[in-house]
Image: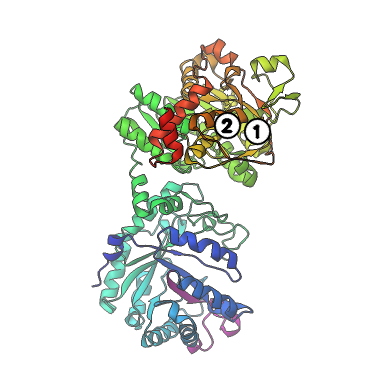
Amino acid sequence: MTSTAAKSATGEFGFVEWFRPGEFERTERLLPDILKSGASYLRTHLSWAEYLAPGGEEWFDWLIPKLGEEIDLLPCLHYTPPSLSRTGRSNGAPVVLKDYADFVDHVLTRYGRHFRHVELWNEPNNLLDWDWREDADFNLFCEMVGGAAYWAKQRGWKPVLGGPCPFDPMWLDLMGERGVLSVVDAVGFHGFPGTWDSEEGSWGGWDMHLGEMRSILNRHNPDAQIWITETGYSTWRNDEMEQARRFMKALQVPADRLYWYSFADVPPNVAVQEGLWFDPRHYHLGMVTHENQPKLLARLLMEGGIERLQDVARLASPNLASGAAPIVITGGSGFIGSNLAESFLADGEDVIVLDNLARAGVDQNLEWLKQHHGAKVHPVLADVRDLRGIEAAFADAKAVFHLAAQTAVTTSLVSPLDDFEANARGTINVLEAVRKAGRKAPVIFASTNKVYGALEDLEMLPMDDRYVPADAGVREFGIGEDRPLSFCTPYGCSKGVADQYVLDYAKSFDIPTAVLRMSCIYGPRQFGTEDQGWVAHFLIQALKGEGVSIYGDGRQVRDILHVDDAVGAYRAVHAAIGRVKGEVFNLGGGPQNCVSILAVLREIEKLTGRPLETGFGEWRAGDQLFFVADTRKLADRLGWQARMRWRSGLQHLADWLRTHRFTDESSALRDLRVRA
């Protein structure tokens, strides 16, 4: 009996990735990331039909050496050229069965130096890949593949029998009785637990199915290995953490190799298989999107391999005691969410931190919360777009703070549908989960000043380093909640839709809700980028000794607010929800923290003691020349006010970054330490 401990002990894995003829750019783009993920193997198809089609030889002459020089390659040789097929289709047996063995022989001669194993056909008991209606007893298949396997073995290569799908032990035993198993070195297995409805009823678990497989192989070829040549999990419901969990589970199964299907999603304009065009699951099996954006699994593997993935997976342990009434914070591992969670945890509250960990680095915030507050922190690693996956988190909630969102205007312009799904659908999913729970838990929503649009009707007076409103009232107090809504950019639209749904659920369903339309929040635990969280981003860049890009002329004005004050506002609204149900509040630093981008840059240069290299680009869509929140309603109704002035807040953030984010002894940090 062959050993199956090698894969589990080493954590080795591979990917399945079908490269279609002509996909030169896609291959060049994906291969470095496949290698960066830590993959040891790659399985791809070498279609007999495509090889004989116009341009086929040239394509595979480029593809196979390209892949084989970089990674342990498993080519899957399948699909009959229609002109040679008994049925006129690529899933039919060839008229002359030996032609397939001759093709295998040709491939070994032409490309064999680039691989050690060769897979003979794909999913042979699946009608889409092999027309068993014309070969009901599989005599044609056995003669075709058995002869090809024998010849490949004689030439020094190791043949792999394509995996049946769905798994059929009787079919596999037939392959043994017909002598096919005796001439192969490994047998493939395909299984996608949790993804396909057709598999759900018959799936008995990895141990059962692979145990059946091992028993059959022991009778016919005890030395043959078991390879999982296809397994995966579709994120069509946006449950990326579940994909990561399934991947980790697959690493532990008793098989000699694992190939995960697949590395990249299929583009939506590509037909996967005839008759399956409209099944979304086929298009979301990758660990990166078709636009090459990493999902959680890809990001973690590329950040630190299996160990990194295991560390994050260990965070996902809700362990909520029966009868507890937790506070739920969506986006609770994010910047504002983690600070808000810490505030409630410090008061002894149970907090469910619901987060998909999509933003790089936020798992560090979750780890910090767990280290400091232990069993009071209940992580639920799920996505608000996945209603089925989040409902249980709200069942006993006594309050909900909904902060999870797609947060960048730039991203919304690139992917408006994704932006809508996260912000609009994600919000109504949260509201529906609360409504279904039946406890009427308060829902306090993080909205944005972008719901007021670009404010183009406000006349601005350009000063040396800032824009100032000509209107004296706006200049003195800022923008009030009575400002008409004017959604601008997909981000403004999706957040605005969510904003209005939250307010309406107070009217339509009597759920106590409130909305905070935020300006620029900054502070500790923020992973700022140039697209979102610009104050922290500028300071981080300065501490690294790197430059920043300014969109526009830098005279844009914002009222920046320290996160401690933002947390105070959220808690004040929560405490008074009975009085402010269905109301909206503008939240920002107010006129006392009104500052231009150029002024912030100057202050950062003072903090670091060195000039900050800056570049200027085109204005971004929907960018407001001026936004200062009129916070008098918060002050009058709830007694809230911003306590941290912006210069002190920047110093506080710089000190925190120096202590918690940077460990190197760069000159910028040395200067900061001296000044501190």
Residue 215's spot in the image, x, y percent? 27, 71
Position of the N terminus by quadrant:
bottom left
Q: Quadrant of residue 418?
A: top right
Q: Say which residue label 1 marks.
A: 554
Residue ID for mark 2: 601
Q: How many marks?
A: 2
Q: Earlier in the sequence, mark 2 or mark 1?
A: 1
Q: Position of residue 292 (x, y in %)?
A: 54, 55
Determine if residue 658 is in view.
yes
Residue 527 drawn above or below residue 510: below
Q: Amino acid at mark 1?
A: Gly
Residue 449, image x, y percentages: 62, 27
| Closer to the camera in the image, 468 or 60 | 468
Which residue type does callout 2 highlight? Leu
Circle 2 sits in a helix, a strand or a loop, which is it?
helix
Judge whether residue 92 is colored magenta: yes
Range of the magenta residues?
Answer: 71-99
Q: Relative to 292, does residue 449 appear above or below in the rendering?
A: above
Front residue of 447 and 440: 447
The C terminus: image quadrant: top left
Q: Is residue 535 left or right of residue 215?
A: right
Position of residue 615 relative to residue 52, above or below, is above
Quadrant for residue 317, please give it: top left
